[in-house]
Image (cartoon, rainbow, N blue to C red):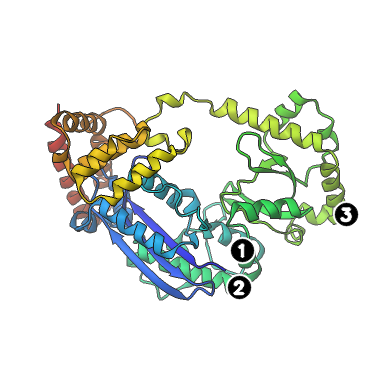
């Protein structure tokens, strides 16, 4: 069994495409959850990036960000030394599949490092937020949670931590290393109090093993999270999604008899209505696949009963043409919904839309990192064919050795950044006017503490320094 590499990221904004990491920490543990190694890295803000003031207040990262002796690029290099040292392992976190791994992949992309290094070459991804939600659903006493205004369990680490581990230092919450430490304690608690869920979760961290389990079991339990709750579904494999390749499951609270009789257009229309009876199950997002007995604890499956569920599953498996039509229809729906002009996407938004770099460029990027001379790095960049990676390579040089660029290249990047961050338009990245407005809103909060006000004043002073520098471009 592989080790777990627990990681947590703190960033200077909420966008995985346009913000950047300012702190990342990790704890390596063996399968028995005993600590083997750890790291904690901080870096300066990237030149040309405007931090989000609210994010900096939440993670309390401002002082360490401006005081760090590491550039973002140097931090990424050190991070990849740990990734290489710890791999292969199961990389995990809290909402890691929803944020941390996406953020890390995009930071790898922008730093010309191997993008999917944490879920290739034997390494896999897991997410213990999903494991905790599923554990709580079937073992209500396994972990203490607060309740929202709507009566739903709250699964934020800064809520779970004090409830379950009173000795935690709450002042350190939202630091990357504290969140890693808290998650490790949650993992130990779930291993002890919801062991069957914990052990099952380790079987679906790879896409191959998840797919095999979904196809092997005639009826299984899975969970989906929506409207603030985890919900159990008794399901059976139906088909593969023709656009994404994911398994599509049939939810067995539905009787398939009438659905099987629908013509193609009616079937496609039914798939777009609320109350979906067929659901894609992304195998790259650590799906929870459990024994059918778990769903039978819950309504409506307890009332429907195993005999009827088996009849429905057999009807699905005996009508292969029905599954093929569903997979094709879901693919068409996805294409119609997400069809875009990819050429209009910014480089930051093009990682998933425009796919992998060519093999030649991968080797060139490797050569780029092997050189310690920025002039040589700049020369190596000229061999990159994919315009996305050439773009990011030039920005790495701007951020780390701007004098290496020609005067024309420097001016072009400098002016482009100035135009973006001084914009008064509503955009996806944090601009200076946006940051200034957020600071004013925070300052005007009722009963704001002196600590928070002083913090915002320091952030504002930093933002003004960025403004002065880039206003010179206009």
Contact? badges 1 and 3 (CB < 8 Å) = no
Residue 274 appears at what percent x and percent y? 67, 35
Q: CA distance from mark 3 to mark 2?
A: 31 Å
Residue at position x 16%, y 40% from top? 404
239 left or right of 404?
right
Q: Nearer the viewer, residue 453 or 372?
A: 372
Q: Nearer the viewer, residue 120 or 48?
A: 120
462 left or right of 256?
left
Q: Which mark is residue 193?
A: 2
Q: CA distance from mark 1 to mark 3?
A: 26 Å
Mark 1: which secondary structure? helix
Residue 416 appears at what percent x and percent y? 23, 29
Q: Nearer the viewer, residue 407 or 99?
A: 407
Contact? badges 1 and 2 (CB < 8 Å) = yes
Above or below for 112 versus 58: above
Residue 412 appears at what percent x and percent y? 20, 28
Quadrant occupied by the C terminus: top left
Crowd class of label 1 (few under 14; some 14 to 19; many from 20; radius 10 Å)? many
Residue at position x 69%, y 39% from top? 275
Mark 3: which secondary structure? helix
Residue at position x 37%, y 36% from top? 348
Residue at the disc numbered 1: 135
> Taking the image as drawn, is residue 7 in sight?
yes
Q: CA distance from mark 1 to mark 2?
A: 9 Å
């Amino acid at each position: 069994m592989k080790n777990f590499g627990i990681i947590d990221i703190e960033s200077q904004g909420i966008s995985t495409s346009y913000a950047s990491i300012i702190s990342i920490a990790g704890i390596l543990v063996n399968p028995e959850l005993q600590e083997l190694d750890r790291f904690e890295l901080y870096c300066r803000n990237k030149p040309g990036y405007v931090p989000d003031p609210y994010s900096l207040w939440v993670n309390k990262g401002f002082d360490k960000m401006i005081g760090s002796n590491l550039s973002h690029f140097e931090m990424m290099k050190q991070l990849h030394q740990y990734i290489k040292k710890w791999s292969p392992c199961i990389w995990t976190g809290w909402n890691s599949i929803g944020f941390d791994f996406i953020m890390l992949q995009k930071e790898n992309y922008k730093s010309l490092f191997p993008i999917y290094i944490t879920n290739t070459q034997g390494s896999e991804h897991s997410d213990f937020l999903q494991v905790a939600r599923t554990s709580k659903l079937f073992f209500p006493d396994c972990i203490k949670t607060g309740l929202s205004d709507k009566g739903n369990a709250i699964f934020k680490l800064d809520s779970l931590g004090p409830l379950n581990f009173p000795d935690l230092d709450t002042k350190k919450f939202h630091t990357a290393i504290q969140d890693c430490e808290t998650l490790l304690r949650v993992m130990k608690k779930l291993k002890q109090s919801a062991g069957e869920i914990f052990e099952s979760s380790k079987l679906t961290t790879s896409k191959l093993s998840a797919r095999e389990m979904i196809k092997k079991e005639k009826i299984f339990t899975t969970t989906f999270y929506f409207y603030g709750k985890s919900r159990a579904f008794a399901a059976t494999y139906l088909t593969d999604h023709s656009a994404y390749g994911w398994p599509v499951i049939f939810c067995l609270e539905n009787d398939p008899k009438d659905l099987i009789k629908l013509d193609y257009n009616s079937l496609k229309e039914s798939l777009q209505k609320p109350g979906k009876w067929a659901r894609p199950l992304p195998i790259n997002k650590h799906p929870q696949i459990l024994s059918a007995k778990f769903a039978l604890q819950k309504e409506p499956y307890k009332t429907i009963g195993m005999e009827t569920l088996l009849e429905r599953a057999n009807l699905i498996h005996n009508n292969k043409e029905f599954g093929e039509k569903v997979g094709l229809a879901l693919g068409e729906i996805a294409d119609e919904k997400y069809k875009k002009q990819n050429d209009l996407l910014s480089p930051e938004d093009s990682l998933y839309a425009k796919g992998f770099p060519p093999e030649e460029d991968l080797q060139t990027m490797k050569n780029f990192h092997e050189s310690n001379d920025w002039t040589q790095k700049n020369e190596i960049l000229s061999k990159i064919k994919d315009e996305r990676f050439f773009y990011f390579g030039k920005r790495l040089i701007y951020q780390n050795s701007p004098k290496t660029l020609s005067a024309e290249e420097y001016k072009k990047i400098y002016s482009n950044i100035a135009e973006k961050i001084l914009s008064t338009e509503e955009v996806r990245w944090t601009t200076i006017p946006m940051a200034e407005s957020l600071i004013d809103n925070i300052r005007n909060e009722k009963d704001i503490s002196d600590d928070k006000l002083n913090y915002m004043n320091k952030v504002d002073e930093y933002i003004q320094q960025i403004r002065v520098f880039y206003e010179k471009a206009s």
